[in-house]
Image: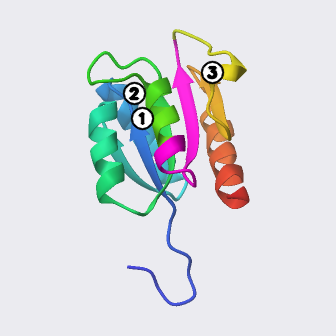
């Protein structure tokens, strides 16, 4: 519950197919004061995005073998369908070309610096 005068916590959707990596990301993002929901693949993420209107940022891995699309395609779909949502893309296997990233998105190679990631999230959400 939000008390009078306090701002609701920004909701971040973490999309990661590796459970341990997802748990780690959810934990450090929650510890930074954000509300977090999670999905194991792009299809689950799309269902969450369609059913909620409070998601402000997604953090998605590129490499997700399950589901109908990888994280880069998901990021493009989010940019097209939900333009206000901020996007962070991560990968431990590939570095996408800047031209392949959706507008206003950021890329972090794995392993990423959690403090830098949190600061980037705050910056993106404040600018939005």
Q: Position of residue 35 (x, y in %)?
A: 43, 58
Q: Which residues are magenta?
A: 79-92
What residue is drawn where x is 33% and y is 42%?
A: 46
Q: Is residue 7 left or right of residue 44?
A: right
> Which residue is identified by label 3?
100
Judged from the image, the secondary structure of the residue bearing numbered disc 3 is helix
> Which residue is identified by label 1?
24
Q: Are marks 2 and 1 in contact (CB under 8 Å)?
A: yes
Q: Position of residue 114 (x, y in %)?
A: 60, 36
- The image shows residue 21, relative to residue 84, as above or below, that is above
Q: Which one is nearer the viewer's eye here, 29 or 61?
A: 61
For the N terminus, the image quarter is bottom left
Of badges 3 and 1, the one in the foreground is 3
Judged from the image, the secondary structure of the residue bearing numbered disc 1 is helix
Q: Are marks 3 and 1 in contact (CB under 8 Å)?
A: no
Counting other residues with Cα less than 10 Å from the Cα at mark 1, is it few (<14), some (14-19), or many (20 or more)?
few
Pick whichever of labels 2 and 3 is earlier in the sequence: 2
């Amino acid at each position: 519950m939000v008390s009078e005068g306090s701002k609701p916590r920004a909701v971040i959707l973490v999309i990661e197919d590796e459970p341990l990596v997802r748990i780690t990301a959810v934990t450090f993002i929650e510890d930074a004061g954000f509300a977090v929901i999670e999905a194991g693949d792009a299809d689950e993420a799309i269902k969450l995005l369609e059913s909620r209107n409070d998601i402000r940022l997604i953090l998605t891995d590129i490499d997700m073998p399950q589901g109908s699309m990888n994280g880069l395609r998901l990021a493009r779909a989010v940019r097209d369908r939900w333009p206000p949502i901020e996007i962070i893309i991560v990968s431990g296997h590939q570095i996408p070309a800047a031209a392949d990233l959706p507008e206003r998105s950021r890329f972090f190679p794995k392993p990423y610096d959690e403090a830098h990631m949190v600061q980037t999230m705050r910056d993106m959400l404040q600018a939005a």
